[in-house]
Amino acid sequence: MTILMYVDRVTFIPYTKASRARLFKEYKEVQREKSVDSDIKLSCDETNIFKWTAVIKGPTETPYQDGLFQLSVTVPEQYPLVPPLVRFVTKIFHPNVHFKTGEICLDILKTAWSPAWTLQSVCRAIIALMAHPEADSPLNCDCGNLLRSGDNRGYQSMARMYTRLAAMPNRANH
């Protein structure tokens, strides 16, 4: 696969060269590790190293199990000093994910970011968040309210339904 370099024609940002080098390093690592981590499939846009797509498997023993969830990853030119913008493309019923926009409430994508994180490790953290929702900081208030009120059955039922409808398209009509 050939990757074409993204060229910023408007302004030169000093981080861009270092950011590209880091992203190419991560790209090579992802290519090497493809068979190692079957829960995450990470790929970059062939024309823009700053645009990535991830497909993550729903964690086992959760209402997201057997689902495949697509994430959009936009990497800023100041990366790795600044976190990537990661959003769910696949609809998901989760307290820490905005249902309409796919925005994710996860500290490492905001205030707890560190350059030690990679795109692969961010995906791993999102899978962990799927397995362990934080109802006290909801972006989806309906989902958060179900969990905070102790209605785990209602949460599980809604999450499973949306997983079947959105993350398992081949089974949605069965």
Image (cartoon, grey):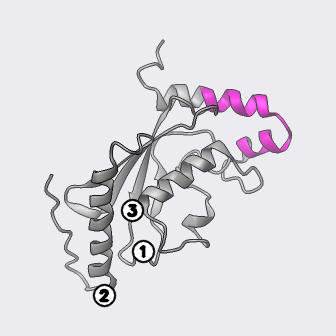
Which amino acid type is shown beneath numbered disc 2? Pro
From this viewpoint, which residue is outermost toward the right?
A: 149
Instruction: Kindly identify the residue that appears in the image at 19 percent across and 79 percent down.
Output: 9
Marker disc for residue 80: 1
Q: Position of residue 121 (x, y in %)?
A: 48, 58
User: What main secondary structure does the magenta stretch of the protein show?
Assistant: helix
Residue 144 lies in the magenta stretch: yes
Residue position marked by numbered label 3 in the rendering: 74
Instruction: Kindly identify the residue that appears in the image at 35 percent across and 75 percent down.
Output: 77
Q: Position of residue 168 (x, y in %)?
A: 46, 27
Q: Earlier in the sequence, mark 3 or mark 1?
A: 3
Instruction: Kindly identify the residue that appears in the image at 19 percent across and 74 percent down.
Output: 7
Q: Please report the bounds of the magenta region as a residue range.
A: 143-160
Q: Using the image, determine if residue 17 lies above or below residue 49.
A: below
Residue position marked by numbered label 2 in the rendering: 14
Q: Earlier in the sequence, mark 1 or mark 2?
A: 2
SS category of the residue bearing label 3? strand
How far, Cα to Cα, is label 3 from label 1?
12 Å
How far, Cα to Cα, is label 2 from label 3?
18 Å
SS category of the residue bearing label 1? loop
Q: Is residue 37 visible?
A: yes
Which amino acid type is shown beneath numbered disc 3? Thr
Choose mark 1 or mark 2, whichever is in front. 1
Image quarter of residue 60: top right
Few, some or many C-alpha atoms within 10 Å of disc 3 (few <14, some 14-19, many ≥20)?
some
